[in-house]
Amino acid sequence: MIDKLILWSTLVAPLLALPAEPLNPRDEFLRKRSPSFEWTAWGDSYASGVGAGRYVDGRRCLRYSEAYPVWINDDPDKYLPGSGGKFNNVVCSGAKGKDVIDYQFYETDQWAGKPNPEYYPRPAVGKPTMGTLTVGGDDIDFPGILNNCILEGFPPPMNGGFKTRTCDEQREVSWALLAQTPEHDKPNNALVAEIDAVIKRIVLEGSKNSNRFKLYVTGYGQFFNDQDPYCDGVTFARTANPNPDGKEHVMMTRELRKDFNAMSRMLNKAIDEAVKLNSGSKTSIVKFIDIDPLLDGRRFCEPGIKEPDQNNGLAGFFHYPYNVKEEGLGVDYLNQVAARSASSLSWDPKRTLWRDYMNEFWSKVDEQELNKALGGDANAQYNFWSDTIGYRARIFHPQPKLAHLIYQKVVEEYLKDEK
C-alpha cells in the first residue's frame, strides 16, 4: 500500500501566523521546514534497518521500523518539533553503489522489476531537499565475510547453494575490493569512484528541488574490541552455538578482530574521500557522518562479556539468533531450487560476491511456486521475509539503540547546517 511506502514525517512545524518582528534563525528554519519539506533516505541494509523493530515492507529490501532514517523521520527526541512533510524511504538491503543508482531513483512507485521481484515494492524517490545515504558494505562483500568468517555458513535459504571460501580466502577478496595496495594503506580507487558516483547522482537529484540540497553520508562501525584476549578462544559459528559441535571453527582472535576493524576503517576512508570530492559546492552540502565513536563500549568482545552474548543490552550490533530452528515454510522449496540450480550459477572464487550470487539464485525462484509453498501456513502472523530472512540477516547490523544514536548524530549535523 502507498501509505506503507510513503511515511509522513514529524520533522517540521507549520507557522500559524508570522510575527510582526523579523523571524529569528530558529523560526526561519521552522518556516522553511513547513509541510512542503520533503526528504529521502538512500542506501543498503544499514539504512533499511534489517531486524531493528518491526518489518515494514520491501521483501528482500527488508525495511524495518527502527532503522536510523525512520528514527530521523519520527524524531522521538523532538529535535524538530511539529508536523508535516514527506519522507521517501527508498533504501534496500543488499544494495551496492550501482544498485542505488539503478533502482533507488524511480519517479513513481514500483511493484515489480529488476534484479528480481523479491526486491519490490520500491517507493518513488520524490523531490527531496535533504537526504541520507549508507552504502559500501555490499561493494566489499561484507555478506561474504559474515558467511565465511563469522557464521561459517548461512542457513538455507540464505546461502542458496553458495560455494564457501575459507576465511583467509574471503579476507583476500574483500581486501582487494577495499584497498588500492597490498599494504592496505589507501582505499581502492574503484571503490571511492563507485561511492562518488552515487553521491553525485543523489546531489543531482536533490539540486532539482533545492539550491542548497543537503546529504548526510553515514559510515560503518568497527565491530570488535580487539584488545581483550577472551574472544581468542571464542567462535561465532552458527553450528557451534549455543552448544559446541566438536568441530574446528574460526576463532575471533585479536589478530582477526584487528583485521576486521581495519576493514571498517578503510571502508570509512573510502566513503570520506568520496564525500570530500563533493564538498565545497555552493549549491549543496555533503557531509560524512562518522558513527564509529558511538560504538565505544558497545562492540563485540568487550571485557567481561561472554560472547556470543545475545542478551548484552549494551551491544550495538545484533548477533545471529542461535538455537533457532533452521526450517520453515518455503525453505523446502528454496532448497529444491538450490539443488537444481547451484551447478549452473556463475562462480569465480576470486571475484564473485555473495550478493551477486544470491541475486542469480533468486532469479531461479518462481514467485508463484514460492507463494504456493508459503500458503499452507496455519499461523496468520507468519511472514517469510521477516521471520525467515530478516530475522537471520540482521546479524552484525545495528540494534535499535545504535540506530537511535545515529539518528541523533545526523540531526545534530543537520541543525548546524540550518543555522
Image (tube, rainbow, N blue to C red):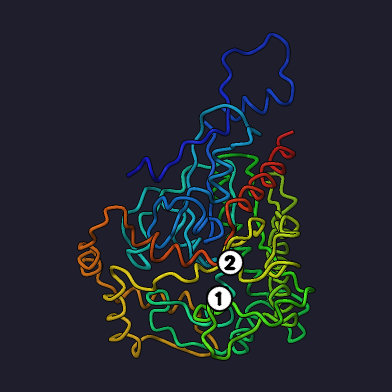
From this view, report whether residue 193 is shown above or below residue 400.
below
Circle number at residue 52: none
* Residue 359 higher or lower than 338, as above or below: above
Rendered position, 133 above or below 416? below
The one of 144 and 36 positioned closer to us in this rendering: 144
Q: Secondary structure at mark 2?
A: loop
Q: What type is the residue that disc 2 sits on?
A: Phe
- Left of 103 or right of it: where is 165? right
Going by the image, does 30 lie left or right of 70? right
Residue that numbered label 1 is attached to = 146
Residue 27 appears in the rendering:
yes
* Of 183 and 339, the residue lying toward us: 339
Residue 229 location (% of width, % of height) = 77, 78
Counting every numbered tag in the picture gives 2
Horizontal side of residue 193 vs 101, given as left or right = right
Tell me the CA gap for discs 2 and 1: 8 Å
- Which residue is located at x 43 percent, y 69 percent? 324
- Of callouts 2 and 1, the N-terminal one: 1
Q: Position of residue 415 (x, y in %)?
A: 70, 37
Circle 2/circle 1 CB separation < 8 Å: yes
- For the N terminus, the image quarter is top left
Instruction: Tell me the quarter of the picture where residue 248 sits.
Output: bottom right
Please name the residue shown 66% across and 76% down the image: 178
Q: Residues within 10 Å of mark 1 (few under 14, many from 20)?
A: many
Task: Name the residue furthest front.
Answer: 243
Q: Which residue is mark 2?
A: 396
Q: Where does residue 347 sit, x and y in percent of width and height?
A: 44, 88
In the picture, residue 379 is in which quadrant? Answer: bottom left
Graded by Cα atoms within 10 Å as few (under 14), some (14 to 19) or many (20 or more), the crowding at tag 2 reads some
- Residue type at the position of mark 1: Leu
